[in-house]
Image (cartoon, helix red, strand yellow):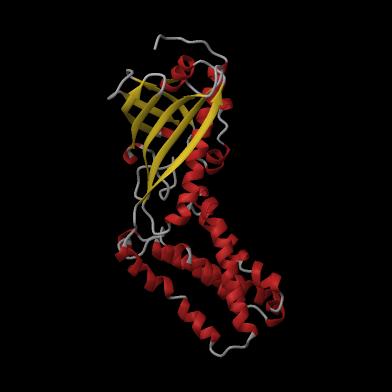
Amino acid sequence: MNNKLRRALLIVFIPVLYALILRLLFGIDSWDKVFYVMTISFLFCLPLIVGMLTIALSPMESVKKFIYRFFAPWAPIFIFAIITLLFNIEGWACWIMILPIFLIIASIGGLIAGYYKLKEKKHQKTYISLLCFLPLVAGPIERSIGAIPGVYKAYTYIDIHAPAAVIWEEITRVEEIPGAEDKGWLTRSLGFPRPVKAELNYLGVGASREAIFTNGLVFHETVTEYEALKKMSFNIKAKPHEIPSTTLDEHVVIGGQFFDVLNGTYELEQLNDSTIRLHLYSHFELKTTFNFYASLWAKWIMKDIQNNILQIEKKRAESSKPKTNM
């Protein structure tokens, strides 16, 4: 093995090894009161230090190139991702959501390390070595502070050319949805369950509704506000113990430690004689220390689910006739 190849492998191996060791430490269940993966200390410090290590270990002739300082840290990040996927340490959903921020922060780490290396600052390797312990110091502090819960709204709507009675029928009784009708591209890409059916046991406040999804996911809903042909609101409860462990990644399980859907509302708005705007919005809760980033993905996911359901209800309503007397 020539020196260049050995150096290249070393540049990648050490950052990947560091990332794996940190992931294993933060993933020990018995240490979850001190270290946990779903923290800024892990999700943001890890790629920063990986990027800095990559550039600190690189030869000066490579570091002089901006494109190298920016993109070289991506190599250990991708290798780290592949290893965690192969050994089922992490799932696809988590990586798709966190990879963009990992790559950006790794590049920032590379640029910081490159700046100091090009300036030939003294003791730069010592400082970077000390930074490797930053997550181990910051993790317990962050866990002691705890997450600040935040409630967010996902709002969607669609215009439907059908009578209110027809639309209402499709809202209260969503018949089985074949896979061909499912247009939820984001949730499908993330491996989330798709909607199957939903039906109220009666029409009115206090009624129960089960929104059934594939892979054993069920939303237990209770109607809290009901105005026929105009508005229906309901509380939503997902019971994590009912959901098979293979259905969702543990870090994004609905009703779990970090993410929960609270309620939903349908509203009908008459735009003109032939068009009704169907509003669908929901509120969900996040319990992380990085809600500023997690809320972006949670909103996209909830909107994708809601838009998918609205498209199905529109298609069925516009090709249907009233079935019941409201």
Does 87 sit above or below residue 179?
Answer: below
Residue pushed farthest bottom? 122
Residue pushed farthest front? 272
Residue 5, percent from left and from top: 69, 74
Q: Please state if 291 lies on the left or on the right of 177 as rendered.
A: left
The N terminus lies in quadrant: bottom right
Of residue 20 and residue 60, the one placed in the foreground of this image is 60
The C terminus lies in quadrant: top left
Res 151 visible: yes
Res 2 visible: no
Residue 233, percent from left and from top: 36, 30
Q: Please state if 251 lies on the left or on the right of 107 as rendered.
A: left
- Rendered residue at 56%/17% (across/down): 274
Residue 291 picture quarter: bottom left
Of residue 88 and residue 294, the one placed in the foreground of this image is 294
Q: How many numbered dots are placed on residues in this image?
A: 0
Residue 91, percent from left and from top: 49, 50
Residue pushed farthest left? 206
Of residue 156 and residue 91, the one placed in the foreground of this image is 156
Residue 15, percent from left and from top: 55, 71
- Rendered residue at 36%/64% (across/down): 35
Q: Please state if 228 lies on the left or on the right of 317 as rendered.
A: left
- Rendered residue at 29%/24% (across/down): 205
Does 93 sit above or below residue 237?
Answer: below
- Rendered residue at 37%/61% (across/down): 36
Does 283 sit above or below residue 273?
Answer: below
